[in-house]
């Protein structure tokens, strides 16, 4: 039977360290995804729809991930398993060819839904903190965390409404923070007109976490070594400041230039 490690003792495996208790989130399960999201409808702004109706083709596009809405619910696969529902919201910009030499850029929303099943253990405790009077957190459900990068626009196409009937976006289900990213209202109804569909490549990591108290080895308090710059200091020479910046090797070579 392994020797019990107690709070305050020294870690025999790490000389000079002390065992302390920390409160953090423990990862119970995780997965990575490489999703090819085909034929996602592009919901343009009001002015963008007018440009789409007069367009001949879609030349190219780019997309930015705005938000990911997550919802966790138990499933019947076994104790401790949960289904995570994810909804990705993108702000996309499409460049249209209207017959003239210069393309026209239009902005709009793209949405994608997916589900995944992960193990998240079990819990029945409620967490109370001093941050809010009477506030509690039901920790019977684990916390879902999604890490994702901006997607790659793989293809785009312009089509008539009658050629590709799909379900319409419900405006009330879109978070206000996502709608606030657009300067105009979005066209989400089935009014006559042309539509744009795109295929995105999305990389993401999903994990389920729970609050936990863990014993960890601690070597010392961490003291910052960098000095705080004074705002009243005279303006520095920009070229001199640039010379002090290290060359970003990792931006030019895979793995930071290491073999």
Image (spheres, rainbow, N blue to C red):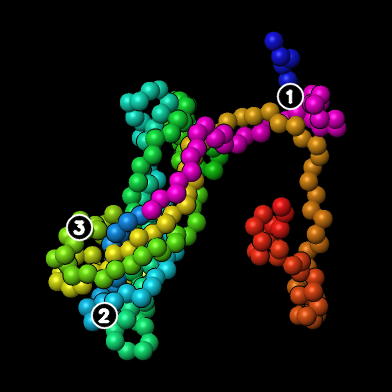
Q: Is residue 29 left or right of residue 193?
A: right
Residue on which disc 2 sits = 55
Q: Residue furthest right?
A: 16
Magenta stretch, residue numbers:
9-36
Q: What residue would you read off at disc 3?
A: 166
Query: 67 or 52, which is in the foreground?
Result: 52
Q: Is residue 113 magenta?
A: no
Snapshot quadrant of residue 181: bottom left
| Residue 28 belongs to the span the image colors magenta | yes
Rate crowding at label 3 as few (under 14), some (14 to 19) or many (20 or more) other CA atoms within 10 Å. Answer: few
What is the CA distance from the residue labelled 2 to the residue labelled 3? 21 Å
Between the residue at mark 2 and the residue at mark 1, the CA separation in whole angstroms equals 69 Å
Q: Earlier in the sequence, mark 3 or mark 1?
A: 1
Q: Is residue 145 visible?
A: no
> Mark 2 and 3 residues: CB-CB less than 8 Å, in contact?
no
Q: Residues within 10 Å of mark 2 (few under 14, many from 20)?
A: some
| Chief SS of the magenta region | strand
Element carrying mark 3: loop
Whole-angstrom CA distance, mark 3 to mark 1, is 59 Å
Q: Look at the picture and state if 127 lies above or below 131.
A: above
């Amino acid at each position: 039977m392994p020797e019990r490690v107690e709070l305050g003792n020294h870690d025999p495996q790490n000389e000079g360290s002390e065992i302390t208790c920390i409160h953090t989130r423990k990862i119970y399960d995780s997965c990575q995804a490489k999703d090819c999201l085909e034929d996602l409808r592009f919901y343009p702004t009001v002015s963008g729809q007018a440009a789409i109706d007069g367009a001949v083709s879609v030349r190219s596009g780019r997309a930015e991930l705005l938000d990911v809405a997550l919802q966790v619910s138990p499933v019947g696969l076994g104790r401790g398993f949960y289904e995570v529902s994810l909804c990705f919201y993108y702000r996309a910009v499409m460049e249209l060819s209207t017959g003239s030499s210069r393309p026209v850029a239009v902005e709009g929303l793209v949405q994608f839904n997916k589900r995944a099943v992960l193990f998240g253990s079990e819990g029945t405790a409620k967490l109370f903190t001093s941050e809010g009077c009477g506030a509690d957190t039901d920790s019977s459900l684990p916390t879902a965390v999604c890490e994702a990068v901006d997607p790659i626009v793989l293809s785009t196409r312009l089509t008539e409404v009658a050629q590709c009937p799909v379900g319409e976006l419900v405006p009330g289900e879109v978070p206000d923070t996502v709608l606030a990213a657009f300067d105009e209202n979005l066209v989400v109804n089935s009014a006559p007109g042309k539509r744009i569909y795109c295929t995105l490549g999305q990389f993401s990591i999903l994990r389920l976490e729970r609050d936990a108290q863990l014993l960890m080895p601690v070597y010392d308090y961490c003291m910052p070594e960098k000095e705080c710059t004074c705002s009243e200091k005279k303006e520095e020479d920009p070229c001199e400041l640039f010379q002090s910046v290290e060359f970003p090797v990792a931006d030019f070579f895979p793995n930071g230039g290491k073999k």
